[in-house]
Amino acid sequence: MNLHEYQAKQVLRSGNINTPRGIVAASAEAAVNAASELGGDAWVVKAQIHAGGRGKAGGVKLVKSLGEVRTLAESLLGKRLTTNQNAPDGQPVHQVLVEETLPIARELYLSLLVDRETERVAVVASAAGGMDIEEVAHATPEKVLTEICDPLLGVQDFQCRALAFALELTGDAYKDFCRLLPQLYRVFVANDLSLLEINPLVVTADNRVLPLDCKMSVEDNALYRRKALAELRDDSQIDAKEAAANAANVNYVALAGNIGCMVNGAGLAMATMDLIQLEGGAPANFLDVGGGATPETVAQGFKIILLDPNVRAVLINIFGGIVRCDVIAEGIVQAVQEVGVQVPVIVRLEGTNAELGRTLLAESGLAILPAESLTRAAKLAVEQAQ
């Protein structure tokens, strides 16, 4: 789950980490009031969306009058901002963050993330921070520095010093960085984050270090114990189908194909999508209704899949282990009747009471195509979708 920048900075401040003064606003008038409250003669206005690349897309700008604050806020609020990370549809802007300006001398890059290969937290830093960090990582990877943290010891002093030296920090900036990095690590662990990215981390004209921007992602599987963070979820920033799946407590990822998939088990879902591709088709989604799927879950799954106008066929692949196939068959019949499915439905049942489940489907009188093997189910789905 991603957080907005202003939310991420609130989390940083709760960890005693200083950030630029800023006020979030949901209207142009509130943005002008925020700038007046902050004082000064220049401000930075930032669109709040769950995507990077806002600066290049016109979503982050320096303004030098209250009139410019109003004009920029009006041009952003209520619109969709499209960046290189959320194209082509973009994301809606419901709030802007109005921040004080800082005398910036240098822009650095710093992030903490879970390294799946080493199963540890990695610290990634670069002296070439700012809007072009992706190009830097691609063209000159030697400029990107990495330190791997021991899970028992966390980030160590020698690692802070090594990165500070490599970033050519001196004096107060060196001290600030060596103090900041352990604080960030504690925030990362304490909030079950999967990503904490600061780009840029700025060195000011008076040689201090400060997070100017912050991107934060919370591990979804830990949200049950991070209820305060879970309440910060903004479903307007994600696909409507994925938002519906969150509400139904099923795992859904939208894809670009036209064959809707409903499967119980992530591994089985991956195998199903692979076979669809092998047969020349393209899955419209990944949907795992879980090992304990119920008729209600199946009905919810149908509703979510059919929110996608590109779906031309639905393939249901259920292995009856924890839940019996006849129960799933009853749920499929109920769901098809309730939802009013207008596209072909292909069903493959295997496992406990699979034969009984197939009989129930055959006697339902509905246009449901049974398949006794996954390969046959994939062939049927591709044929029907075409």
Image (cartoon, rainbow, N blue to C red):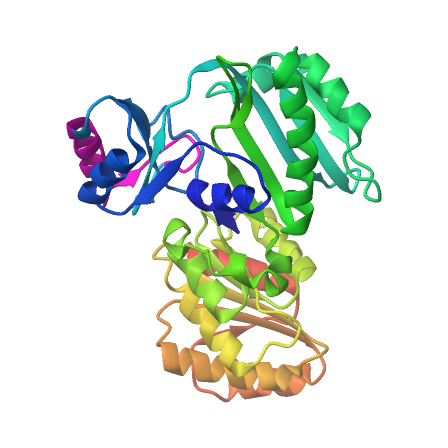
What residue do we see at 47% from left, 53% from top? 284
Look at the image and tell me in which quarter the C terminus lies.
bottom left
Q: Position of residue 315 (x, y in %)?
A: 52, 65
What residue do we see at 53% from left, 68% from top? 249
Q: Which corner quadrant of the image does residue 357 belong to?
A: bottom right
What residue do we see at 35% from left, 70% from top? 342
Question: Is 301 in front, or is 148?
Answer: 148
Q: Is residue 111 visible?
A: yes
Q: Is residue 77 magenta?
A: yes
Q: Position of residue 192 (x, y in %)?
A: 65, 51
Question: Is 119 in front, or is 265?
Answer: 119
Give above or below for 239 relative to 158.
Answer: below
Q: Position of residue 155 (x, y in %)?
A: 76, 34
Q: Is residue 11 magenta?
A: no
Q: Is residue 361 visible?
A: no
Q: Which residues are magenta?
A: 67-87
- Please indicate whether residue 318 sits to the left or right of residue 367 in the image: right
Q: Which corner quadrant of the image does residue 344 belong to?
A: bottom left
